[in-house]
Amino acid sequence: MMVQKNRQLSPFHASCHQYITWRHLEPQEPPPYKLQALNFATTKPLTLILLIAIAIATPPIMNSLFARLSRPFTSSTMRFGPEGAGAVSVPEGTEKATVAAGCFWGVEHMYRHHFPKDAVLDARVGYIGGNTDNPSYRAVCTGRTGHAEALQIYYNPSKVSYQKLLEFFYRMHDPTTEDRQGPDVGTQYRSGIFTHNDEQDKIAREVTKKVQEQWWKQGKIATEILPAGEWWDAEDYHQKYLDINPGGYECPSHFLRKFPDLD
């Protein structure tokens, strides 16, 4: 499998992209590069025709836009500014693991529902690996802040090991696509492991080497392994998003692969 590079929009398609996005903002909002959701029930026919025509004409580029705009629309998803996020309260001895694997809604949902509650004690979606302070979802979606959509996991090491969390990470997404996960394209959807100490770094590299040799032979793993830098919680409405919105968007590449146990 070839690593897929992020493609740039032509000036024409970029203009159409921004026009479609702007048409579905609240009037007082300036037009950003990207909008999270579009309500097809109330969308004007001309706009829908334009969106479909562009998607058909340039599918490799527009698939990501179409999928992201097709997310179920709620009033809360129009709020782009940072909001206060509650502090995580966990027992002494709890450890952290931080991963990025595409749209963080699905990543959080899969980790929370796969592992027992006494193993994964809590989790927060947020932003990491960027170059600006206190980023908003709106800013991260432009790709200009450098942040990845990520999940910070608080786990009990006596119930689940860091290695098992990473093995699950490599089963639940495609780590061979660079700056992309399914139809979602951009550096914010990159695959990454952000380590909190030297031991985690060692385990991350060992697990990555094994899964490259045994699970993902058909393509080169593009997952970055870096020390965890500044973490920023995402806005409150992103937390447990798919539990609160069961019909919400789920990246099609987020599913559990049936790989054999690692040697």
Image (cartoon, helix red, strand yellow):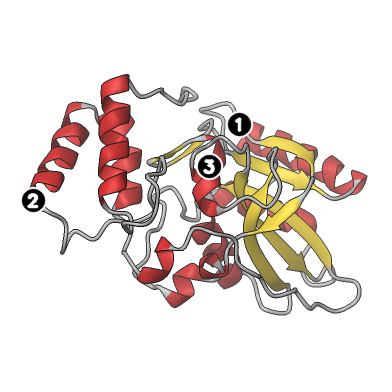
User: Which circle's residue, 1 or 2, is located before the other in the chain?
Assistant: 2
The residue indicated by pointer 1 is 221
Q: Residues within 10 Å of mark 3 (few under 14, many from 20)?
A: many
Provide residue 87's location: percent of width, then percent of height.
75, 74
Are discs 3 and 2 less than 8 Å apart at CB? Answer: no
Q: Residues within 10 Å of mark 2 (few under 14, many from 20)?
A: few
Provide residue 255's location: percent of width, then percent of height.
46, 55
Provide residue 260's location: percent of width, then percent of height.
59, 49
Q: Is mark 1 on a helix, strand or loop?
A: loop
Label 3, label 2: how far apart the Cα atoms are: 31 Å
Q: How crowded is mark 1: few (under 14 residues within 10 Å), some or many (20 or more)?
A: many
Q: Is residue 27 above or below residue 187?
A: below
* Label disc, if present, on residue 45 of the rendered structure: 2
- Say which residue appears at 33% left-offset and 59% top-offset: 26
Front-lying residue, 33 or 4: 33
For marks 3 and 2, give the one nearer the viewer: 2
Q: In this view, does 262 lie above or below 111?
A: above
Front-lying residue, 1 or 44: 44
Say what amino acid the circle numbered 2 marks: Pro
Q: In this view, does 91 lie to the left or right of 114?
A: right
* Label disc, if present, on residue 189 of the rendered structure: 3
User: Which circle's residue, 3 or 2, is located before the other in the chain?
Assistant: 2
Label 1, label 2: how far apart the Cα atoms are: 42 Å
Say what amino acid the circle numbered 1 marks: Ile
Q: Is mark 2 on a helix, strand or loop?
A: helix
Q: In this view, does 66 lie to the left or right of 126?
A: left
